[in-house]
Amino acid sequence: MGIVSGIKYVRYSAPDLDVMQGFLEDFGLVLSRRTDKELWMRGAGQEPVLHITEIGSERRGFGIGLQAASLDDLRAIADAAGVELCAAPEHQGGKRATLVDPNGLRVDIVYGMPQADPLPIRAPLTLNDSRSSERRGIYQRPMRGPSHVVRLEHAVLAGPNFEEALSFYQTILGMKISDVITAGEGGEAVAIFLHCGLGNAYTDHHTVAIMRYPESAIDHAGFVTLDWDDLMLGHQHLKAAGHVHDWGIGRHIMGSEIFDYWRDPFGNKLEHCFDGDLVNDDHEAVTVSIEDDILSIWSPPLSDSFTRLNTKD
């Protein structure tokens, strides 16, 4: 077993790269690389790519890229999965092992991928609250426009082989359970949130979550915005551009993120999020029932389309 330390990117398939690029730019991503067959979009941070679209007839997310904690971890993961460790494509850099999880989703494990220069953006806003007023003589005037996506936080992966997928992410990639959602009288697990097993080091509440579902695909990917106002400005921009809103704005219970869900032009669900929980391996997982209204602390009512993998199917 090896250890992964975070998520690098998500992979999607779509029949029109121009249309996908237009949406993702409105969502707050920036063009990084494009060919006739592939679109790379980055955020404002140091990752050269967060979202990859490959040209194809399918309209779904089919893979993720995870960061190995070290080169030795990458070797251990490749050995455990019985796959070859090889040099990544020249435009990507570093080394890569390509796995397939029990639901048929592609899982790239990468190490040594060169970082990019961060893009120039404003600093997160300082907020006055009921206990402190650090903002004095400084005015809040963020510019209107798309959100500034800074990084990719998580991907929720759907598929029918639930228990096998859980074992894969735990035993091969060293991930740990953060929380569990059950459903029905028998208390069957329908979603499990997994964080990177980094010992005492704090990491995102969930880098990967697995969801019991008849079809295999990325249910959604969560992208972190610069701050609260940035998320709200992105909501306003996407709405004005005529894109399809799915659910939000609200605050989750599991993971605690402020969330705002949108659909890309091909029916896939993407999330803007902010202020998520950090946990380490001392975290004690909680099991809750979906019937107990545990998807949000506050939000509008859940949309009719939210539980669908793709609204275009």
Image (spheres, grey):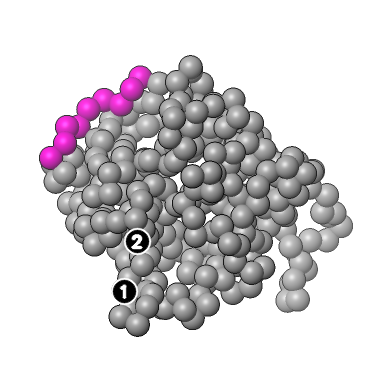
Q: Amino acid at mark 1?
A: Glu
* Label 2 Cα crowd, 10 Å radius (few <14 / some 14-19 / many 20+): some
Q: Give the image location of residue 187, x and y in percent.
A: 33, 79
Q: Main secondary structure of the magenta part?
A: loop
Q: Mark 2 to mark 1: distance in Å?
A: 10 Å
Asked whether 189 falls inside the magenta stretch, the response is: no
**Is any part of residue 54 visible from this angle?**
no
Q: x and y percent of residue 162 in the render?
A: 28, 60
Q: Which residues are magenta?
A: 82-90
Residue 134 in the figure: left or right of residue 107: right
Q: Which mark is residue 188?
A: 1
Residue found at the far top of this picture: 36
Check residue 212 in the rendering and tell me which mark sits there, or answer none.
2
Which secondary structure, mark 2? strand
Q: Residues within 10 Å of mark 1 (few under 14, many from 20)?
A: few
From the viewer's side, name the closer residue of 206 and 244: 244
Q: Position of residue 272 (x, y in %)?
A: 59, 52
Work out whether residue 21 or residue 56 is closer to the camera in this orientation and state it.
Answer: 56
Q: Is residue 277 above or below residue 117?
A: below
Residue 200 placement: quadrant:
bottom left
Give the structural element (helix, strand or loop) at label 1. strand
